Image (cartoon, rainbow, N blue to C red):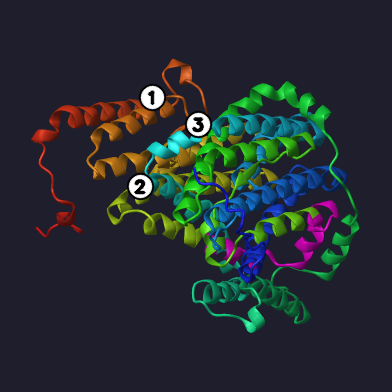
Amino acid sequence: MSTARSDFKPTLWTSGDWNAFFGFGTNILVNMLVLTGLLRFVLKMPDTLVFGRILPALGLMMCLSTFYYAFLAYRLAQKTGRTDVCALPSGVSVPHMFIVTFVIMLPITLKTGDPIKGWSAGLVWVFFQSFILMIGGFIAPYIRKITPRAALLGTLAGVSVTFISMRPALEMYMTPQIGLICFAIILVSWFGGVKYLKGIPAGLVAIAAGMLIAWGSNLLGLGIGGLSVKGLGDAFSNFGFSVPLPAVGQVFSGFEYLGIILVTAIPFGIYDLVEAMDNVESAEAAGDEYPTTRVLTADGVVSLIGCLMGNPFINAVYIGHPGWKAMGGRIGYSAATGLMVVVLSWFGIISVMLALVPVVAISPILLYIGMLIGAQAFQTTPIKHAPAVVVALTPHLAAWAKLQVDTMLGATVTAAQAVGGLAGDKVGEVKAAALASLPQQGVLYHGLEVMGGGSIIAGLILGAVAVFIIERDFVKASAFSLAGAVLTYFGFMHGEAVGVGGGFGVTPSVALAYLVIAAGFFAVGKYGSSSVSYMPQHDLPLAAPAE
């Protein structure tokens, strides 16, 4: 094992860190703005709880995380003598932000009529997630070792194309006067290499341009961007100074909801495990090799600290390391982001930022990261593994499409009730009838539901099976198919819940299909390979031959 080079002192801040800081910092800012909106407007939590307890604890957790990953980057740079080492990005896990809000905290808040009860349940959810991450940190390196890179990065690309890229892309086209202009500003610099006046970071130029258009349009009475002087004035009422305080009592009071919490805490803990592995693999593909165990256990530890101080959101290594590295980020951008988060959360500035900057000006940065991660899956894996990357994408497309259908249907039912056209006791029947009619309209909802369940794990399994088939290693393809059968049986993939489905598995037909193909691959690998003739890879047809 190589030792650290004590004679080499890595540079803590470079000019590229400004680019990465404004890019990553605005990414974090968007997530904090969304999170604050969920707490205040969905969960109806009082501002004293949001700005006085939850956000200060969140700031502490994220500061600890970003400082730790800056430290890991410093040690890696010192060890290797390289000047291009980039720290892993980290922050609140965005998928879990919505899951803990809508699946845990909101139902309990509505049932009890007490948002404090919902807060306590969210804390318990993070409590268990933290320990799953810490334990999983010792298992993850072995999973990374046996799983092909195309599978790890392919399923990550699926997340980036759907849940990272699509929303900001849609927001850009909803307000193209700001979104498309800011997108062009970013692309010209980060992909085209154009430098702006006096080296001003492209992210800052884009945000400034977005603010100028939004506030300038108000002078003309156009209101592009949805900002107002009144909204900005109201935001200043949340100014103050709050430090995180222990919330151990609230954590343990939430244990009364343990049954509801564990149903999602365990599968999403496994989701975290796989996602973190994918992101570490992505960083290694970009040239920075970090220890998987230390990354996962660090996420678990800082999440636990945040939970015990009152933060109901879990920390995660973020997708996007290659993007921040490509724009010049090294060590300092991570620590600077941590300091920014503390200032924003401890002084109540988040609401002011929400009223000052149009969110659509920040959206192009998230789309840029999605573009880069999607491309990386193809660029850093063998060309012949491209089909495996594509098949790893597909469960995420299904999961995203199902979410759109579910959201639309829920909104339609709510609207029908609001105008008095739907009785409360008929809601279930109407939803069932609507879903049953979708196949006749060309929407295979049940297929989306089954394929998209546990999408990140499903993508990994499908991608790995495809890689090993391409490499004609049918025994390993069989092993991953068997793993798919077991995971499907218990609902970790291709299912909406974890369990055994009354003894027959959550989706027994899918589990059985995986089991059958596992047996078939094993038979081919062990006994039939000598009798199978293979077409050389370079002779594979790119299109079906003409009749």
User: Residue 234 appears at what percent x and percent y?
Assistant: 87, 61
The quadrant in which residue 531 appears is top left
Q: Is residue 477 magenta?
A: no
Between disc 1 and disc 3, the foreground one is 3
Q: Main secondary structure of the magenta part?
A: helix
The quadrant in which residue 469 appears is top left
- On the question of residue 171 being in view, the answer is no
Q: Mark 1 belongs to which amino acid?
A: Pro
Q: Secondary structure at mark 3?
A: loop
Badge 3 or badge 2: first in the primary sequence: 3
Badge 1 or badge 3: first in the primary sequence: 3
- Residue in front for this viewpoint, 395 or 376: 376
User: Residue 467 appears at what percent x and percent y?
Assistant: 30, 44
From the viewer's perspective, tell me whether residue 381 is left or right of residue 304.
left
How far apart marks 3 and 2 lie (CA) works out to: 25 Å
**Location of mark 1 (residue):** 508
Point out which mark residue 253 bears: none
Badge 2 or badge 1: first in the primary sequence: 2
* Residues packed near mark 2 inside 10 Å, few (<14), some (14 to 19) or many (20 plus): many
Q: Mark 2 belongs to which amino acid?
A: Val
User: Residue 435 appears at what percent x and percent y?
Assistant: 48, 39
Q: Secondary structure at mark 2?
A: helix
- Residue in front for this viewpoint, 247 or 414: 247
Residue at left offset 69%, top offset 69%: 225
**Location of mark 2 (residue):** 391
**Location of mark 3 (residue):** 139
Residue at left offset 43%, top offset 28%: 487
Q: Which residues are magenta?
A: 343-369
From the viewer's perspective, tell me whether residue 254 is left or right of residue 86.
right
